Amino acid sequence: MLFALICKDRAGRLQVRLDTRPAHVAFLEGLNGEKKLAFAGPFLDTDGKPNGSLVVVEAPDLAAAEALSAADPYAKAGLFESVEIRQWNWTFNKPASA
């Protein structure tokens, strides 16, 4: 099943995001290689700077989705103020390979 990880950055932590980005991207590439990543990308503020993330993962249950979320280098670096994890049903415009 799919889970949406809706992550909000802590205020003033843009440099943490930038410094941690290579490890975060490598983490997502690993999930993608394991067929656990549906899609991902940053939320942007009014200036076009990242201030959060939306990551949709494939996991057998909420506990597994929570474990994936906790393993993200951004989470480990303390970037996020909050992370909401919600089960999600991809209904429209789902790629045939997903």
Image (cartoon, rainbow, N blue to C red):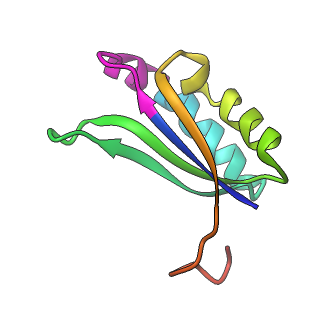
**To which quarter of the image does residue 94 belong?**
bottom right
Look at 76% across and 33% down and name the residue there.
67
Look at 68% across and 78% down and name the residue there.
97
Look at 82% across and 49% down and name the residue there.
61
What's drawn in magenta, residue-wise?
A: 8-20
Residue 12 counted in the magenta span: yes
Give the side of residue 35 with respect to residue 41, left or right.
Answer: right
Give the side of residue 57 with respect to residue 64, left or right.
Answer: left
Which percent across, then down, holds residue 7? 49, 36
Look at 59% across and 79% down and name the residue there.
95
Residue 26 counted in the magenta span: no
The image shows residue 16, relative to residue 34, as above or below, that is above
Which percent across, then down, holds residue 19? 43, 20
The extreme left residue here reads 47
Q: How many labels were placed on the picture?
A: 0
The image shows residue 85, relative to residue 32, as above or below, that is above
* Quadrant the N terminus occupies: bottom right
* Quadrant the C terminus occupies: bottom right
Taking depth in this image into account, of 43 and 23 the one nearest to the observer is 43
Which percent across, then down, holds residue 52? 40, 36
